[in-house]
Amino acid sequence: QEQLVESGGGSVQSGGSLRLTCAVSGYSIGSDCMAWYRQIPGKPYDGVAAIYTGRGSTYYDYSVKGRFIISQDKAKNTIALQMNDLKPEDSAMYYCVAEPAISCVANGWSEWNRFRYHGQGTQVTVSL
């Protein structure tokens, strides 16, 4: 059974860093579109960053560009999100999502429902 499990969330002060990891089980990461989303209760899911694991192409929302870095490790069957210079507005539940066997250009990465697999999320809280 395919499963995505996030880890690495927590509480940090403004300006701090966290590294989120998404462990994939049930299949091997190949040439897939994978992404990180975040959600504040009552708000829509927002795409934060995406990676096409075939070529390593990366994509970022303007709100995190220059602060967050998405990466992959096929040997460990994981992707990660390094979050630097965190701000209170980055506080949210962060989710890993995946759509196998398609590029992020072809699939798009800004719509939650375009991804077949979704993790359960990990909470990130940034205080002043």
Image (cartoon, helix red, strand yellow):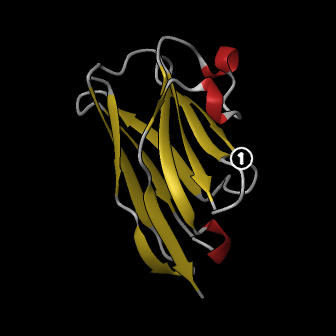
In this rendering, position of residue 1 left or right of residue 72? left
Residue at the extreme top of the image, as rendered: 101
Q: Residue at x 63, y 77 (%)?
A: 88
Q: Quadrant of the N terminus?
A: top left
Q: Is residue 100 positioned above or below 22 on the image?
A: above
Residue drawn at x 63%, y 74% is 87
Dot 1 surroundings within 10 Å: few (below 14), some, or many (20 or more)? some
Where is residue 110 drawn, in percent x and y? 71, 35
Quadrant of the snapshot with the C terminus: bottom right
Counting from the top left corner in percent of width and height, residue 76 is at 23, 34
Q: Tag 1's secondary structure?
A: loop
Residue 47, percent across and down?
A: 65, 43
Q: Could you tell me how many numbered marks the image carries?
A: 1
Q: Is residue 29 above or below residue 125?
A: above
Q: Is residue 40 above or below residue 33?
A: below
The residue identified by callout 1 is 61
Relative side of 105 to 52, left or right: right
Q: Choose between 113 and 18: the one closer to the eye.
A: 113
The outermost residue toward the right is 62
- Residue type for callout 1: Asp
Decide if residue 111 is on the left or right side of residue 29.
Answer: right
Q: Residue at coordinates 55% horizontally, 12% vertically from top-left? A: 102
- Residue 56 seen in this snapshot: no
- The relative height of residue 10 versus residue 128 in the rendered view (above or below) is above
Q: Residue at x 44, y 52 (%)?
A: 121
Q: Is residue 60 visible?
A: yes
Provide residue 42's location: percent of width, then percent of height: 69, 60
In-image side of 25 versus 41 (left or right): left
